Amino acid sequence: MLNADYLTIYSKIEDLNIKKFDEKKIFKLRSLGIESISDLLYYFPRTYDDRTNIKTINQLQPDEYAVIKASIVKITAPPIRSGLKMIKASAMDGTGVLDIIWFQMPYLRKSLKIGEEYIFIGQIKRGYVFQMINPEFKLFSAQQKMQDGEILPIYSTMKDLTQNTFRKIINDFLVIFGGRFEENIPTEILKKHNIMGRKSALKEIHFPSNSKNLEEAKRRFAIEELLILEMGILERRFSTDKKKSNHYVLDDKKELVKKYLSSLNFSLTDSQKKVITDIYKELSTGKIVNRLLQGDVGSGKTVISMILLLYIVENSYQGVLMAPTEILAIQHYTSVRDTFYDLGIKVGLLTGSFKGKNKEKLLDDIRNGNIDIIIGTHALIEENVEFKQLGLIVIDEQHRFGVIQRKKLRSKGVLANLVVMSATPIPRSLALSIYGDLDVSILEGLPPSRKPVKTKWINNAMDSGIMYNFIDKKLSQGKQAFFVAPLIEESDKLSAKSIEELYEEVKKSLHKYKIGILHGKMKSADKENIMNSFKKKELDILVSTTVIEVGVDIANAAIIVISNAERFGLSALHQLRGRVGRGVDQSYCFLVSFTDNAISKARLNIMEQTNDGFQIAEEDLKLRKAGEIFGIKQSGFSDLRFIDIIHDIKTIKLVKDTCEEYLKNHDGRFDNEFLTIDINQKFQEN
Ligand code: ADP
Ligand code: MG
């Protein structure tokens, strides 16, 4: 049952018949995405003009939001990576110097004046001196009346809707409707964590009485928003946990698995064994497995998935392995096809390029249970793929798939177990929240006798020459090399090498060797042929786009050269580097980049210093924004408006624990009409 207050706050503003808001203004609000009263009162200030608290530069603390009054003494526009434009101003207030940096706002250069005094509002970052990035600012004029004791909200509005008009609209609606916003966080949670009530928080977030209350209000909405997401994730989790899975027998014999293990030319590491045993155990309890397996690039996750799939088949169920690229799916398929065939197990391959009769036959075989293990790409989540009895879904390189794809595949075997594997480690605390519906296992370390890949950043033409000589020597000793070019748009051809150009360059420098070329637009049969020839050492060099970024496993490849390395994020570089160092020999990674960009340089330095994926992930977080991290975009976490999931791990953890405790005490259910509707809306949009 919905109560009247609920309906009111979700009513369309134009239906309210409030005389003083004329059509025109309502129309303007709509173009800001504001339709209902709830939209309007949840349209929070972008920042505040806090005249009560102007700080001096020598008082600043890193990460705080501050208001500064300072004069600009210098303006420069240092050149940085193409596509990004930066303006840098040095500002002084008599107590120190602050660097003010604006990205992508070249037009500001004209309006900023040296010698003038400005008010800057923004977050303080560490740098050579303290910095503010993209702050709000305005000219300070002495005649301006100081509005003592007032913290004024500043909204993102549009041209002909001034801050003052907007403030007035908000204020009027707050007065009339603010009282209808019933509390939507359960009282027990509010009390326990000392969270500001909804009605006061709405008032304080728009018109703060003081900065402490403002902080409290912000915290409340961050928690409210996260709670919606987390309760949704965890409720689903609780309900799957309640369902009993099929019964899997923890049979000591495990004939298939044993035979498969003896076909391998290595034995499992302790960490691999532990992960497998843990999952076996969970399967045998009849609980549905929901697990994220994180292990650095090259740590040996594929073997684990094969063993689990065999185990499921031995229990008379079908298994699925889904990979993010066709190349990877083909590689998984060809690596086990023959061995599995000898074991009497039928493996099928399904990718987007399967059409017509072959595909129909394959789909029939899957439906009838003639195929035991099916390996493929996202083509597997298509409507018409049906299974006879699906027991296990393994998703490789999970960070490339979102929650939605996971859910779709899941729906094909409601009682099926799910193991997702990822080599893009995100810090555990973050992983636990984002994948709140999954348990997390970590595969520690790498198989023995691996040597860390030696990494060198090549930043000038002379070193590049030395690099080619070095590679020549290695190739003449029978090693193989990858050369990787970034994907580029036609329009930025000037600043990066295309794969064809790279191919020509490699051919000129290393003409003695056989060179193949591989990119995403090729036909799948051609891709397969090229990969096979490289694997069989018919080719010495593979020039490729990033289609080889994830999963590709060729032990004899000991060198990877990444051109225009500044174009890749840290996790992509780490993944690419993981294509080598898979055998016992020393491997090498060359990052070719003549960049001047400070962030790119920082990335390349980190790559030279460490091979540890978890450390790289932590550094990556510092250099990036949340939305840019793989896997987060699709999780719903990047849509959060009131919380910064990277820097606010503490709040995330608090909310997760709170939700878990609440659901435990309430039979896995969260019945709050205000929040649950929001949840449904959120999930429907997905
Ligand atoms: P990733 O975790 O990146 O998916 P893979 O599963 O591709 O790693 O494994 C990398 C390589 O290590 C493969 O060639 C695989 O055969 C090999 N490998 C896996 N486990 C072991 C082990 N216990 N000992 C030696 N080599 C192993
Ligand atoms: Mg892999």
Image (tube, rainbow, N blue to C red):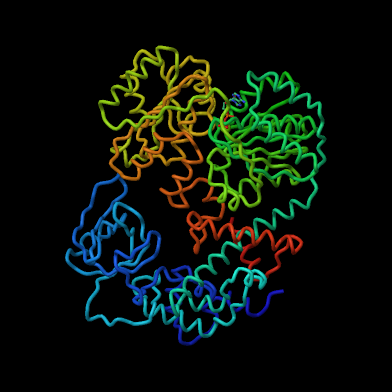
Residue at 46% of width from left, 87% of height from top?
20
Ligand 1, what quadrant?
top right
The percent position of residue 336, horizontal first and vertical second, equals 65, 24
Residue at 63% of width from left, 46% of height from top?
406
The percent position of residue 511, horizontal first and vertical second, equals 34, 15
Q: Is residue 269 left or right of residue 567?
A: right
Residue at 41% of width from left, 48% of height from top?
623
Residue at 42% of width from left, 41% of height from top?
569
Where is 241 relative to 224, above or below? above
Q: Where's the C terminus, which quadrant?
A: bottom right
Q: Quadrant of residue 385?
A: top right
Q: Where's the N terminus, which quadrant?
A: bottom right
Extreme-left residue of the structure? 115
The percent position of residue 325, horizontal first and vertical second, equals 54, 35
Q: Quadrant of residue 371?
A: top right
Q: Quadrant of residue 232?
A: bottom right
Q: Is residue 656 left or right of residue 205?
A: right
Q: How many marks?
A: 0
The percent position of residue 674, horizontal first and vertical second, equals 64, 71
